[in-house]
Image (spheres, coloured by chain):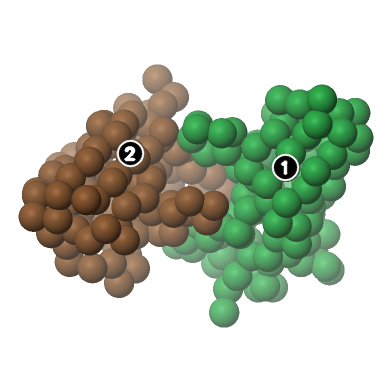
Amino acid sequence: AQSVSQHNHHVILSEAASLELGCNYSYGGTVNLFWYVQYPGQHLQLLLKYFSGDPLVKGIKGFEAEFIKSKFSFNLRKPSVQWSDTAEYFCAVSYGGSQGNLIFGKGTKLSVKP
Amino acid sequence: DTEVTQTPKHLVMGMTNKKSLKCEQHMGHRAMYWYKQKAKKPPELMFVYSYEKLSINESVPSRFSPECPNSSLLNLHLHALQPEDSALYLCASSQEGPGSPRGYTFGSGTRLTVV
């Protein structure tokens, strides 16, 4: 079955630490890949997306992600986190071209200590 | 206008009530969605409207009834809900169909409590 896995349920970091959140998907065909962020009490915001081209994509707020097709992975990274990055992060995938539904991973809660 | 607007932001309803959630976007997006999000869980897809036609119904109970009056508006009619239906209901839209490579734009949600 098509699925998205996020490895970390809760990550706790100090400010200025580097961040990497794992995301793996289960299907080897055409995929569109996304990372969304949900700050406390706020709506889902798109951080970045990949559907073709350069596998290293840069998003808002200094985040980036790398698509590694051979590993079915799309990990999110940030060199130096800030307290304001405290939020829930969701990896999402749509499979199979234009009719594929957007499926979310279970999410990773990031807590950044000031 | 780059937003998806949902009303109301909060709703408390009894199990015998009938209420509606509303969603609006003016970005010219051709697909709109309803998601349900329980606390500390990812959003789960409920309904998809693509070009104003209901294309996917993810086996949602009939007490939830979607309606798409036009390409900018999406409603979710609620009737005889159960307490376990309490959740954050999210509306989203995309420029193309469900597999849009541009991603979805989400609204702020309606926090629904069924008593």
- The picture's colour for chain A is green
Q: Residue furthest front?
A: B115
Taking the spot 37% from the left edge, 31% from the top edge, the residue there is: B4
Vertical placement of B8 versus A26: above or below?
above
Q: Nearer the viewer, residue B16 or B27?
A: B16
Q: Quadrant of the N terminus of chain A?
A: bottom right
Q: Residue furthest bottom?
A: A1
Vertical placement of A113 versus B1: above or below?
below
Query: Can you tell which mark lies on residue B110?
Result: 2
Residue B63, given in percent of the width and then of the height, sits at 17, 62
Vertical placement of B48 versus B12: above or below?
below
Count residues near mark 2 (Cα–Cα under 10 Å), then give few for <14, some for 14-19, many for 20+: many
- The picture's colour for chain B is brown
Question: Which secondary structure lies at badge 2?
Answer: strand
Q: Quadrant of the C terminus of chain A?
A: top right
Give the residue type that dot 1 points to. Leu
Please indicate whether residue A79 sits to the left or right of residue B64 in the image.
right
Residue B6, given in percent of the width and then of the height, sits at 31, 33
Q: Is residue A8 visible?
A: yes
Taking the spot 38% from the left edge, 38% from the top edge, the residue there is: B109
Question: Which secondary structure lies at badge 1?
Answer: strand
Please indicate whether residue B83 sits to the left or right of residue A49 in the image.
left
Q: Is residue A45 visible?
A: no
Task: Tell me, yes or no, whether dots 2 and 1 are on the same chain.
Answer: no
Taking the spot 73% from the left edge, 51% from the top edge, the residue there is: A10
Query: Can you tell which mark lies on residue B114?
Result: none
Q: Which residue is mark 1?
A: A110
Count residues near mark 1 (Cα–Cα under 10 Å), then give few for <14, some for 14-19, many for 20+: many
Give the residue type that dot 2 points to. Thr
Q: Are marks 2 and 1 in contact (CB under 8 Å)?
A: no
